[in-house]
């Protein structure tokens, strides 16, 4: 199996991409991105758990239900979230779908809308509809077109994010390729992420939904930048069926799940590493828990602690802040059985200080990425969680975002 995080993209058959500037972003950069599935595709999606939900999330969810999971096109705009815009926002998202459907001679329910950007500003829908014809005519099944698509959906991201994997089944190649955006408002239960995953496997909407839920739980729901859950989160998985390889059962299903997991894990880690102001990516390994839910609960409290995250920003091996976070996690553990390691350096033994060379640990924590292991002494389950530090640059980016 091949896995590409950057550079060459492995493109699945059955999808075409384009991007252009529609004038939504004040910068004049590309802000309208389109994917077309000329022969149609089956699709499934997961969305934000925030109770404040953007209009395109509502419309996209409704469209997938109405179409039975069939999809002809995806239309994404950056620069405006179309959230907290009331009935006007819903009508705008629906108008985008109707306009694209008319151009494609397809039902509006087979068009999936997405938006990302500032909240509470009416969507200039005419800027999208006026450029849809051009965007659809320009779609191509090429790497350059896919890269342009990845670039056009960015907001505060510093770089595009993509990953792909390929496996062979029944004498045919099956490809999985994902493109994502996300930099801030990153928190489990999805984040300010837009993630679009494409495959040429044969799979029903139901099969896609099941494998996507399982994979997301282990990848996108195990990352955090700042603890904020966005209003527009979307992870969409589309299958064109162009390879002719069914992945509902047997070895093909296992290989497909493995390829999807590789792509999603790569994308989730790229999102954290591109977090707003991030200097250090930290992988938390919570070991010897009673169950996976307990491990994740502890990891999330550590990952969201401002005191812990600012210590990481200074490469400060202040293990006491980690222990304190563990203690307030709500897990009924015995602090006297907790051991903490920063890389290979044990800094806490049985809930108390363990001698270590501070300069060596500081040097290790100065690396762009490193690991912290917590052993709870409670059981045999373990969890993995990817997070980051919190720097002054994060404050600067978000203090000036709307102005």
Image (cartoon, grey):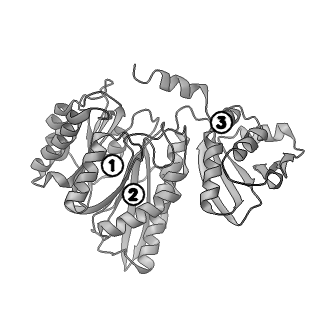
Image location of residue 324, percent across then percent down: 74, 41
The residue that appears at 66% across and 61% down in the rendered structure is 382
Residue 309 is tagged as 3
The residue that appears at 72% across and 65% down in the rendered structure is 379
Image location of residue 90, percent across then percent down: 22, 39
Q: Are marks 1 and 2 in contact (CB under 8 Å)?
A: yes
Name above or below for residue 288 compared with residue 312: below
Q: Nearer the viewer, mark 1 or mark 2?
A: 2
**Furthest residue to the right?**
355
The quadrant holding residue 117 is: top left
Task: Describe the element under mark 1 as helix, strand or loop.
Answer: helix
Q: Which residue is mark 1?
A: 146
Q: Which residue is mark 2?
A: 177
Earlier residue among tags 3 and 2:
2
Q: Does residue 14 appear anywhere in the picture?
A: yes
The residue that appears at 9% across and 48% down in the rendered structure is 102
Name above or below for residue 189 compared with residue 87: below
Image location of residue 121, percent across then percent down: 29, 27
């Amino acid at each position: 199996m091949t896995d590409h995080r950057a550079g060459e993209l492995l493109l699945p058959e059955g999808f075409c991409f384009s991007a252009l500037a529609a004038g939504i972003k004040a910068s004049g950069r590309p802000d309208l991105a389109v994917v077309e599935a000329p022969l149609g595709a089956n699709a499934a999606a997961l969305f934000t758990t925030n109770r404040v939900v953007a209009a395109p999330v509502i419309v996209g969810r409704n469209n997938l239900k109405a179409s039975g999971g069939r999809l002809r096109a995806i239309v994404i705009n950056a620069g405006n979230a179309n959230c907290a815009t009331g009935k006007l926002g819903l009508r705008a998202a629906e108008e985008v779908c109707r306009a694209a459907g008319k151009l494609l001679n397809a039902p509006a329910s087979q068009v999936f809308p997405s938006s990302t950007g500032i909240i509470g500003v009416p969507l200039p829908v005419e800027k999208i509809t006026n450029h849809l014809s051009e965007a659809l005519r320009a779609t191509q099944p090429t790497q350059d077109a896919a890269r342009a698509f990845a670039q056009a959906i960015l907001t505060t991201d510093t770089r595009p994010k993509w990953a792909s994997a390929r496996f062979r089944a029944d004498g045919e190649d099956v490809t999985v390729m994902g493109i994502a955006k996300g930099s801030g408002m990153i928190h489990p239960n999805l984040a300010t992420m837009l993630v679009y995953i494409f495959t040429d496997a044969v799979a029903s909407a139901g099969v896609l939904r099941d494998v996507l839920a399982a994979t997301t739980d282990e990848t996108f729901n195990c990352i955090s930048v700042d603890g904020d859950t966005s209003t527009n989160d979307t992870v969409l998985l589309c299958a064109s069926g162009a390879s002719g390889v069914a992945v509902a059962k047997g070895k093909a299903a296992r290989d497909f799940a493995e390829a999807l997991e590789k792509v999603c894990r790569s994308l989730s880690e790229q999102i954290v590493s591109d977090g707003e102001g991030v200097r250090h990516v930290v992988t938390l390994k919570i070991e010897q828990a009673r169950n996976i839910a307990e491990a994740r609960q502890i990891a999330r409290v550590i990952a969201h602690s401002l005191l812990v995250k600012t210590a990481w920003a200074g490469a400060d091996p202040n293990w006491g802040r980690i222990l304190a976070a563990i203690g307030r996690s709500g897990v009924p553990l015995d602090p006297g059985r907790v051991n903490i390691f920063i890389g290979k350096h044990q800094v806490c033994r049985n809930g108390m200080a363990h001698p270590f060379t501070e300069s060596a640990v500081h040097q290790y924590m100065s690396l762009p990425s490193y690991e912290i292991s917590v052993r709870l002494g409670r059981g045999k389950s373990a969890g993995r969680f990817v997070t980051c530090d919190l720097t002054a640059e994060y404050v600067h980016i978000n203090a000036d975002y709307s102005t």
